[in-house]
Image: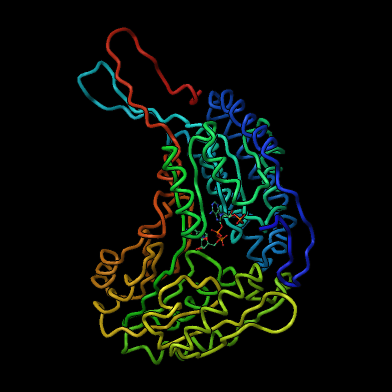
Amino acid sequence: MPIQTINPATGETLRSFDALTDAEVDARLERAEATFQEYRHTSFAQRAAWMTRAAGILEESKDSLARLMTTEMGKPLAAAVAEVEKCAWACRHYADNAARLLADEEVETDARRSFIRYLPMGPVLAVMPWNFPLWQVFRFAAPALMAGNVGVLKHASNVPQCALAIEEVFRRAGYPDGAFQTLLVGSEAVARILDDPRIRAATLTGSTPAGQSVAERAGRNLKKTVLELGGSDPFVVMPSADLDAAAGTAVKARVINNGQSCIAAKRFIVHQDVAAEFQERFVAAMRTLRVGDPMNGDTDVGPLATAAIRDEVEEQVRRSVEMGARVLVGGGRIRGPGFYYAPTILADIPHDSPAYREEVFGPVALLHRARDAADALRLANDTVFGLGSSVWTRDEAEADFFIRGIEAGMTYVNAMVASDPRLPFGGVKQSGYGRELAAFGIREFVNVKTVWIEGGEGPGEHPAAE
Ligand code: NAP
């Protein structure tokens, strides 16, 4: 894929970049390794000062950063501004909490003293997607840098200016040169980078095939990976639910980020007793969405990020309809410049159709009817994915049935799934493994060192705690 900014609202190519040569990549990896040898010894207080400054820079620059995101991938501008603010929140969260989350843990044993110390691993490669061009990167970078690692970013090829802007935020925040670097390279360069001994671990957020390829290569090199992959989240509505709230949130949860979110609700599984009522509200609300220029404040849904994504959504819907799915609203691309696709709801979706089996990465909701709670659970789990899930019920026992039964990394009851720096984020099955955010996230890329001490006075505090 060429490294280019193409405005998805117009289809116009705005900027093109040459990929770094192997020698240029090597020089950056050398700088990452050299920086790590110094950076690993910095204190939490020093790292927190830089991270807090990064948060301030994000807040000051939120309008220009948001416009850049919208220009490169088409999300509505207000959502882009909110994304920058969320990045600042994650920076402050880890600046304020890393020392506590990574403090030495005393363990009583037969030793005079034994404890666990969390030490950094080294340069970590982050392969990131375009859909939340800033948030995906910051939710990796804030904990990784606070833990004493250094970061090397290979961002998606359609958001190169966002990738460079992120590097610039860390540079302006005062981090040592080499603490966070962007590599403008295509996906074909990733294998070689993973083979490089200076890279100690990798994280990828993206599609399942990309995750498989990175995990395979990293596995051959015995390097740890965290994978945040695709999802086809169920949104279960039971008879006791507040139907107005459920239908309103269903629309938001499906079209967030123009329908291109891993944790967007994609499969709406509604109990037959309330199916007709829910459908009526859901269809009516989808019809009122305003599709258009994402820079315009009134727009609810902008274009899909690339022509290829729009074409794939179109193909998935076309084939599913051919196999028998029924279009309740939308159902096709919007003619004219830009990569627009109409907000769509499909019903009667055949079991083997792409809409049933695959992740649909666009504003297309898939409506299913369930006979009872057990049938709803069966439908919810009838997917290779296991990222998030949302359940709407006012019956506590029923909520607990779904919390226990749904095979997913997250279950939100009477709410849509959203990431939060205070809570772990990640999936099971083909949605990946490992967790980002919260304590789990910062402990993914650390050496969990066991320390056993006999005799003498022994060391005191974690040196980074000074
Ligand atoms: P993608 O095509 O997998 O790309 C993601 C990143 O991986 C890009 O930087 C891409 O580089 C790189 N890549 C692609 N193929 C690769 C390979 N074989 N080896 C190494 N790197 C490779 O995904 P996307 O279309 O950008 O993003 C959409 C997908 O991401 C959806 O499936 C979505 O559900 C998932 N996602 C998951 C989460 C989560 O937290 N679980 C969050 C957001 C998105 P190029 O751009 O150069 O190809």
Viewer-proximal residue among 357 and 163: 357
Count of marks, rendered view: 0
Q: Report ligand 1 position as a quadrant.
A: bottom right
Q: Please name the colour scheme applied to the rendered image.
A: rainbow
Residue 215 is situated, as x and y percent measured from the top left of the image, at 44, 48
Instruction: Examine the image and state in which quarter residue 116 appears.
Output: top left
Q: Residue at x 29, y 22 (%)?
A: 114
- Most extreme residue toward the left is 110
Residue 1 is situated, as x and y percent measured from the top left of the image, at 66, 58
Viewer-proximal residue among 417 and 364: 364
Q: Is residue 65 above or below residue 166?
A: below
Q: Residue at x 53, y 30 (%)?
A: 44
Instruction: Examine the image and state in which quarter residue 325 appears.
Output: bottom left
Instruction: Examine the image and state in which quarter residue 447 appears.
Output: top left
Q: Is residue 32 above or below residue 384?
A: above
Q: Residue at x 68, y 75 (%)?
A: 339
Q: Is residue 289 above or below residue 132?
A: below
Instruction: Describe residue 395's horizontal placement relative to residue 302 as left or right.
Output: left
Residue 437 is situated, as x and y percent measured from the top left of the image, at 46, 48
Residue 2 is situated, as x and y percent measured from the top left of the image, at 70, 57
Q: Is residue 102 above or below residue 342?
A: above
Instruction: Describe residue 257's horizontal placement relative to residue 281 as left or right.
Output: right
Q: Residue at x 36, y 70 (%)?
A: 383
- Most extreme residue toward the top is 456
